[in-house]
Image (tube, helix red, strand yellow):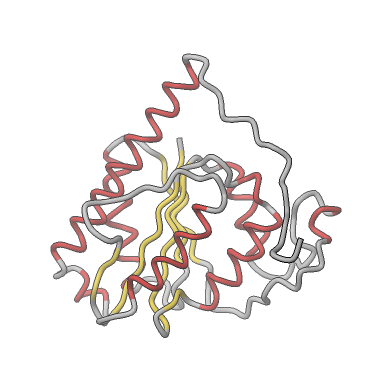
């Protein structure tokens, strides 16, 4: 079993990374393989709604950034933790652009796999940012991993996060809960419990 921890912050080893590392420790302690994947700080285009991914083996047609890399990694992962710094009470522009495209084009690589979102901030905006990331998970038939408090840490730099005892405990609980659920799912598979069958997607709007 493997969990992919996605660092969507602009700084590779800052506050978000520190939070993800605390989650990772518990996963490793539980015998779960992990990988922290930094999305980087290079330009990432947003989704243009072209729909060409349906003709491109469920991969984005733009292959000049990290989106298809994430889609490929997602195929091999059994669970996810999506982390971001808080920018204007929202996740980073990079992680939003990446997840818009990755979840739309590579949706099957995420479906039915447990996931958690975590955010880091200096002071405020954390719950709004967390809500945005959680929506990627809850719209994609992915079991949502919770903790004992909102999934956030506080601090202006990594050293500050290490002083946020409650935040670190929250991260550790995420790791424990993720490991527990992954093992439950694996045990279910061994006993013939399979994923739900997906219905054909129905799309309606508010004028018909």
Viewport quadrant of the C terminus: bottom right
Name the spot of residue 80 as percent of width and height, x first.
46, 50
Q: Residue furthest front?
A: 208
Instruction: Please name whichever residue, 91 or 2, is drawn nearer the observer in this view of the structure.
Output: 91
Hey, which quadrant is residue 196 in on the image?
A: top right
Residue at image position (30%, 53%) is 23
Q: Residue furthest top?
A: 191
Work out whether 193 lies above or below 13: above
Name the spot of residue 134 as percent of width and height, x first.
45, 59
Work out whether 156 lies above or below 187: below
Instruction: Please name whichever residue, 20 or 112, is drawn nearer the observer in this view of the structure.
Output: 112
Viewport quadrant of the N terminus: top left
Name the spot of residue 67 as percent of width and height, x first.
65, 63
Instruction: Please name whichever residue, 150 or 2, is drawn nearer the observer in this view of the structure.
Output: 150
Taking the image as shown, residue 90 lies to the left or right of residue 102, namely left
Work out whether 185 lies above or below 43: above
User: What number of labels is visible?
Assistant: 0
Residue at image position (20%, 60%) is 168
Q: Residue furthest bottom?
A: 88
Taking the image as shown, residue 166 lies to the left or right of residue 63, namely left
Name the spot of residue 83 as percent of width and height, x first.
41, 64
Taking the image as shown, residue 89 lies to the left or right of residue 63, namely left
Residue at image position (22%, 71%) is 161
Taking the image as shown, residue 83 lies to the left or right of residue 176, namely right
Work out whether 134 lies above or below 200: below
């Amino acid at each position: 079993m493997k969990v992919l921890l996605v660092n969507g912050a602009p700084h590779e080893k800052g506050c978000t990374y520190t939070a993800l590392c605390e989650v990772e420790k518990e996963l490793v302690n539980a015998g779960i393989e992990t990988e922290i994947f930094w999305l980087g700080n290079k330009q990432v285009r947003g989704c243009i709604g072209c729909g060409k991914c349906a003709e491109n083996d469920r991969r984005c047609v733009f292959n000049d950034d990290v989106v298809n890399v994430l889609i490929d990694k997602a195929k091999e992962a059994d669970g996810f933790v999506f982390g971001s710094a808080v920018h204007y009470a929202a996740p980073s522009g990079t992680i939003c652009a990446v997840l818009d495209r990755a979840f739309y084009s590579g949706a099957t690589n995420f479906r039915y796999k447990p996931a958690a979102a975590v955010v880091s901030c200096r002071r405020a905006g954390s719950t709004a940012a967390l809500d945005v990331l959680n929506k990627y998970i809850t719209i994609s038939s992915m079991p949502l991993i919770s903790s004992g408090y909102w999934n956030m840490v506080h601090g202006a730099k990594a050293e500050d996060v290490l002083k946020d005892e409650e935040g670190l405990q929250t991260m550790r609980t995420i790791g424990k809960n993720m490991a527990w659920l992954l093992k439950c799912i694996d045990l279910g598979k061994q006993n013939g419990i399979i994923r739900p069958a997906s219905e054909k997607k129905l799309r309606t709007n508010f004028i018909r």
